[in-house]
Image (cartoon, grey):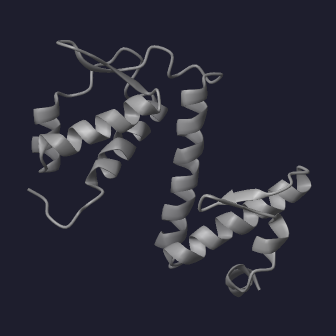
Amino acid sequence: MREGKPFLYREIAESLRRQIASGELKPGDRLPPVREMARRWNCTPGTVSRAYAELAREGLVVGHRGGGTRVAPSVLQPERPAWRWATLVNRAERFLLDAIGSGYTPEEAQAALCVALARWEEVAGGKGQKARGKIYPPSAIRHSSFALHFVG
């Protein structure tokens, strides 16, 4: 089993999210059984179950006792909140991976997202931006020494 990967379930969930977003997995398609996925990912069945549970919370999959876990019937309807949320998270994660792949640290990539969100909030007339569970006005992020260190 894989050791030292405390968030492997997130990797599994993201892999499945991408397959759903790309249409490789279509509404109604059955996900592989938990034990099969555990063998593929060289992990415990509990890790796969946790990934499936995360996707279920997002509304991307539904579980049926005795029928396995399937892609939610409405997941590919763009007006559905679950689809919109999964797409947005996927885009943000792609940005972070691209930034890190280009040599930026995770902290630099996160700071760039915070600055971009603060600018967007300001343009959109937002009063504040939520970061790390707290509400900050856009100016607090834009003018913070941490963010300014990365954006000049």
Q: Quadrant of residue 53?
A: top left
Quadrant where the C terminus sits is: bottom right
Across and down, in percent, residue 3 comes to 14, 64
- Above or below, comparing residue 7 to residue 23 in the picture: below
Residue positioned 35% across, 50% down in the render? 10
Residue positioned 47% across, 71% down in the render? 101
- Above or below, comparing residue 117 to residue 53 in the picture: below
- Above or below, comparing residue 135 to residue 105 in the picture: above
Across and down, in percent, residue 52 comes to 30, 34
Residue positioned 23% across, 36% down in the render? 49
Residue positioned 22% across, 40% down in the render? 48
Across and down, in percent, residue 111 comes to 64, 72
Quadrant where the N terminus sits is: bottom left
Q: Quadrant of residue 46?
A: top left
Residue nearest the observer in this picture, 61 or 130: 130
| Side of 68 where 113 appears, left or right | right
Across and down, in percent, residue 105 comes to 50, 78
- Does residue 115 show up? yes
Q: How many marks?
A: 0
- Does residue 19 show up? no
| Side of 114 where 128 appears, left or right | right
| Side of 18 where 47 appears, left or right | left
